[in-house]
Image: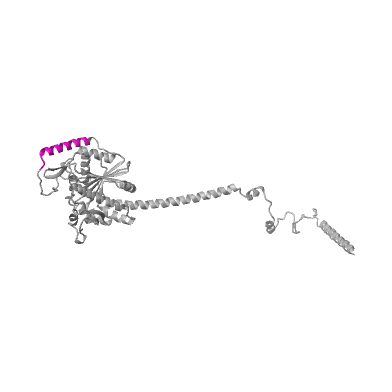
């Protein structure tokens, strides 16, 4: 019974297949009767040559050409790496540009600040100083009896011989920068030029990496060019820093590159700005320091004190203890203490210090020279310093010339020692 059912099912399927074949034959294209009919995949018919509707055209996939295959082919790993590498280069270039721009801005700010302080300085030229025909006597109306004339003649003969020798050649070295620091004692510089109360030659030897500070005693008897025999400090009174530099070059045979002048009356304001200087004072020096001080600031006895500007100025000017040697030593002591304190200053303290001191400074440095010098000043401050004076203790002769107490020195001896200490 099951067998008969299976047979009937098979027969039915055959009949359906025959009907489909017949229907297919009936629908076959007849070229004589009209356009050929085409069927699409869904079984729908359309005349031959008729375009498919847009909907079906979009749904039917377009055969891929060889160019499509090339476009859709995945990029090699090397191409991706190249693209990624170029991206890193662009990022690196952008970062470099930003960093350089920042550094340029920072450098511009620093330069502007530096030149702000440089512009506080009074820049001078040699032509700014008039040479006077005469000056007021330093000792007032006090006149001392002259030394024996033969001693005076002998000293002046040696001075002339020394001038002739130095006129042939001045000792110089590109590795050595000689700067003359001049401290003046004028109470009113606009009216009275005053004299050079302190003369310290600061020699920076960049080869040996040393700083040599040489104090020249103000009473040393020298020949002032175009003026005649006089005390060394009178050269400043006659013709200012240019004539003083010219006088020292002529008498000591070394080239002085630049000068810096500061008035001692402004010096005290500078010391107050840095909080005073730490100085060990002797019992003998106390009365001279107290002479112009307020009662509350007077010292009772010798010892180590932090001297304010007024006290430090009085200390530096003491002439009657240790003669002029003690005086120059005290000035160097104060200078050393200023150097020491400036090295430990904060930026704000250093700014206050410069604002106070620079308006009272005059120099023949160019602004650009000051700028480059400031870039190296930290190195120069780290150099070890040695001190000396001309003349040395016991190596001079006290004399009286033209009623003035002066120091007669052996120029040949000191010039040799000076050149050896500065230039090595």
Q: Which one is nearer the viewer's eye here, 59 or 206? A: 206
From the viewer's perspective, tell me whether residue 161 is left or right of residue 52: left
Q: Position of residue 169 (x, y in %)?
A: 24, 36
Q: Position of residue 1 (x, y in %)?
A: 90, 64
Q: How many numbered discs sit on the rendered protein?
A: 0
In which quadrant of the rendered view does residue 164 lie?
A: top left
Note whether 255 is above or below 72 in the view shown.
Answer: above
* Quarter containing the C terminus: top left
Q: Which one is nearer the viewer's eye here, 194 or 85? A: 194
Note whether 280 is above or below 401 in the view shown.
Answer: below
Q: Which one is nearer the viewer's eye here, 294 or 363? A: 294
Q: How is the image coloured?
A: one colour
Q: Residue furthest bottom?
A: 1
Q: Position of residue 153 (x, y in %)?
A: 13, 37
Span of residues in magenta: 146-166
- The secondary structure that most of the magenta stretch takes on is helix
Q: Is residue 222 visible?
A: no
Say which residue appears at 26% left-offset and 39% top-offset. Answer: 419
Q: Is residue 161 magenta?
A: yes
From the viewer's perspective, tell me whether residue 42 is left or right of residue 168: right
Q: Is residue 411 visible?
A: yes
In which quadrant of the rendered view does residue 408 lie?
A: top left
Q: Is residue 69 magenta?
A: no
Q: Position of residue 389 (x, y in %)?
A: 22, 44
């Amino acid at each position: 019974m099951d067998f008969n059912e299976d047979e009937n099912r098979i027969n039915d399927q055959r009949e359906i297949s025959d009907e489909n074949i017949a229907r297919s034959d009936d629908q076959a294209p007849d070229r004589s009767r009209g356009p050929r009919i085409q069927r699409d995949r869904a079984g729908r018919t359309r005349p031959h040559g008729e375009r498919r509707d847009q909907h079906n055209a979009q749904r039917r996939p377009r055969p891929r050409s060889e160019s499509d295959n090339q476009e859709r082919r995945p990029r090699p790993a090397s191409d991706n790496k190249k693209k990624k590498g170029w991206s890193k280069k662009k990022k690196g270039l952008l970062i470099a540009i930003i960093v350089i721009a920042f550094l340029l801005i920072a450098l511009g700010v620093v330069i502007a600040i530096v030149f702000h302080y440089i512009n506080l300085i009074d820049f001078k030229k040699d032509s700014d100083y008039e040479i006077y025909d005469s000056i007021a006597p330093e000792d007032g109306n006090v006149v001392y009896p002259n030394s024996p004339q033969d001693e005076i003649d002998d000293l002046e003969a040696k001075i002339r011989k020394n001038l002739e020798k130095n006129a042939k050649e001045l000792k110089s070295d590109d590795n050595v920068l000689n700067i003359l620091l001049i401290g003046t004692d004028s109470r009113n510089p606009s009216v009275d030029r005053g004299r050079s109360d302190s003369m310290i030659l600061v020699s920076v030897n960049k080869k040996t990496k040393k700083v040599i500070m040489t104090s020249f005693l103000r009473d040393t008897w020298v020949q002032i060019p175009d003026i005649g025999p006089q005390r060394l400090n009178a050269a400043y009174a006659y013709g200012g820093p240019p004539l003083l530099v010219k006088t020292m070059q002529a008498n000591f045979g070394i080239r002085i590159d630049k000068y810096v002048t500061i008035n001692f009356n402004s010096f005290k304001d500078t010391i107050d700005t840095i909080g005073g200087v730490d100085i060990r004072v002797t019992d003998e020096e106390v009365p001279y320091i107290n002479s112009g001080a307020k009662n509350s600031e007077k010292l009772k006895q010798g010892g180590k004190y932090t001297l304010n500007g007024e006290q430090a100025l009085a200390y530096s000017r003491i002439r009657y203890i240790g003669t002029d040697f003690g005086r120059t030593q005290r000035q160097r002591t104060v200078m050393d203490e200023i150097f020491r304190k400036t090295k430990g200053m904060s930026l704000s303290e250093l700014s206050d210090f410069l604002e106070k001191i620079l308006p009272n400074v005059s120099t023949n440095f160019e602004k650009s020279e000051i700028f480059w010098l400031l870039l190296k000043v930290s190195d120069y401050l780290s150099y070890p310093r040695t001190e000396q004076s001309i003349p040395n203790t016991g190596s001079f002769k006290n004399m009286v010339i033209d009623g003035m107490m002066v120091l007669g020195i052996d120029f040949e001896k000191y010039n040799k020692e000076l050149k050896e200490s500065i230039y090595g």
